[in-house]
Amino acid sequence: MKNIPELFGTMSFNEKTMKERLPKETYKALKKTIDLGEPLSAEVASVVANAMKDWAIEKGATHFTHWFQPMTGITAEKHDSFINPTDDGQVIMELSGKELIKGEPDASSFPSGGLRATCEARGYTAWDPTSYAFVKDGTLCIPTAFCSYTGEALDKKTPLLRSMQALSEQAVRVLRLFGNDSVTRVNTSVGAEQEYFLIDKEAYSKRKDLIYCGRTLFGSKPPKGQELDDHYFGALKQRVSDYMKDLDEELWKYGILAKTKHNEVAPAQHELAPIYTTTNLATDQNQLTMEIMKKVALKHGMVCLLHEKPFEGINGSGKHDNWSMSTDTGVNLLNPGETPQDNAQFLLFLVAVIKAVDEYQDMMRLSVASAGNDHRLGANEAPPAVVSMFLGDEITAVLEAIGNDEHYDAEAKTAMELGVSVLPKFPKDNTDRNRTSPFAFTGNKFEFRMLGSAQSIAGPNTVLNTACAKVLKGFADKLEKASDFNKALHDLIKDTYNEHKRIIFNGNGYDDAWITEAEKRGLCNLKTTVDALEAYVNPKNIKLYEEFGVMTEAESHARYEIGMENYSKVINIEAEAMLKMAKKEIIPAVSAYTADLANAVCAKKEAVPGVNCKTEESIIAKLSDLSAQFYDATNEMEELVAKAESIENVAERARFYKDNVLEQMDKMRSPADIIEYNADREVWPYPTYGDLIFSVDE
Ligand code: ADP
Ligand code: MG
């Protein structure tokens, strides 16, 4: 038995290690930077760098890297060794304060959306001391933010850190009004539940679509999928259980609080949830978790698929972003609390989130938009593309009562008077077990359920934090001027709720009737990534990000361009992969198979003149027809891709890919899947759905 508490965090330069390794004064100075965002002096940085290096070397490191999160959505690293030559021809191992704080990777090959002219290809990375460094595969990884030389954010971390700062400042202002003078910072916390698929490596390697795109582009439905619901929470297969054990241990070494693991709805689908932590750390840790999930799978002869929709007709994978705000004194602001005063404060923060989500629903939708996630949202397996909020009946009743100037009649028949009476105890996560709401209040946190499994959680949290900062700023402005605080507070909660209650929907989010109703309420329904991306360049949203220093107008435009460009690239790769499979595998296979059948017919007729060859002949006829249809669709696809690539304007190109190429993919797929269904499995060039999703069953 391994000693888990001893193992935990051994590869992470965490608080415990810092305390052990750093001189007291250095530790104190670093803590101030971490907790309060105070600048770090050069001397402190150099002491920290040295201690970090010594620690890393003990963990087997020879190199260090600034570990950052460019707009590709994955993490990037460039390794430098610690060695430095000495006069006598030897080397010593060094890491200077400067090397710790700032790096200058060549930024020219990372997406910048036109922010950085090629002649000014330099970008720099800056140490983020609020996230722990760690040793991975012999390299000390230093979490960093990534900016252009003129200071524009080229990554996902920079806006997130800026948004956390913005929210903290405004939330503290509001708390002061409730007489709270001890809080100096409000942090957002996140626990990201992560879904994934595990399939056998050997089966995976035979599928070009999985290799190039992370999802299957062809495949007829297996006899059994998820219809029996026998996988959800089912007993773990040995191979999967071994994998999960290994994964937990790896994650624990990095100080990641991996907590829950279970089988998900689809066969071969699983979930992992960590215990929540500060958003910034949670974001880095989720990136690391995804990387480690893939790595550990390979060790077990499996491949971990993080794509949002690896298999058609089978549930895809998402990620739940559990989000709350809490003070540095340990109070969760989304917890109703025990006293009338706490309750009033809770309701104010609650309506702040309601207003934020309503006013920036387009940005919320945008923050989860990706070509992969487009296959899930609104497809009856994940929340719809319409953003709404679930509050549960009880809280809705409380807000309704306030909104209508009625006294709230709980079971105890107590009257609800803000700042005077106490709210009834809300059972945590009381009703919404159907999980159809995109954004659900679950007792003391919100669960944002629209995220795709492969995406970074930085974007969604940046939007949430910034939108809430904006609303809290408005609240603070108003309340600071009020002569009668309690009355102003009451009116503010009442008016905010009444103005924004259209965003609240407690029913079944998968119901078509809701989409109609949502339209009536004026909620936006941005069906695809291409539609959602427009939110980046909406003046209202540009203004929001500018106001809080989260992103400049140029940065917002850059992200719009990157998003469009990326969308086109993804669809292009999928189309190219389909063409390749069509020409190199499917067409030759069906042609060889029908030729075999034809030869068999000839041989049979020669052996027994007048013999009945109906089976073979009808298969030949059927497959030949389908094959011709498939061949035409393939040629059309080739033309469409060429046309798409000739479109200069990024947005127009993306739209063309969505409207034409994506559609054509269906046209190629449907005859191919029928051919697969009818052809001999021996001649079929790649593993079927059945082979893939039941491949780790032993
Ligand atoms: P469920 O979603 O099944 O009800 P839990 O309520 O236990 O499960 O939490 C799911 C995720 O939410 C976990 O990652 C958990 O750590 C996280 N979580 C719990 N409380 C908070 C909170 N106050 N802020 C952010 N995340 C939280
Ligand atoms: Mg959940």
Image (cartoon, rainbow, N blue to C red):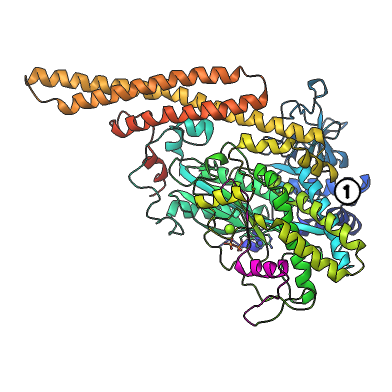
Closer-to-camera residue (270/375): 375
Residue located farthest toward the left when viewing the structure as drawn: 609
Is residue 652 one of those drawn in magenta?
Answer: no
Amino acid type for the residue under numbered disc 1: Val
Location of residue 631 with respect to 496 vertically, above or below: above
Percent of width and height locating residue 449: 60, 52
Report whether 223 appears left or right of 15.
left
Location of residue 659 with respect to 641 vertically, above or below: below
Percent of width and height locating residue 348: 77, 64
Closer-to-camera residue (357/498): 498
Q: Residues within 10 Å of mark 1 (few under 14, many from 20)?
A: some
Residue 255 sits in which quadrant?
bottom right
Report whether 525 appears left or right of 36.
left
Is residue 386 one of those drawn in magenta?
Answer: yes
Mark 1: secondary structure: helix
Quadrant for ligand 1 reads: bottom right
Percent of width and height locating residue 339: 77, 77
Quadrant housing the N terminus: bottom right
Q: Which residues are magenta?
A: 383-412
Residue at the image point whose x is 45% and y is 48% from the top? 268
In the picture of the structure, the residue carrying the numbered disc 1 is 47
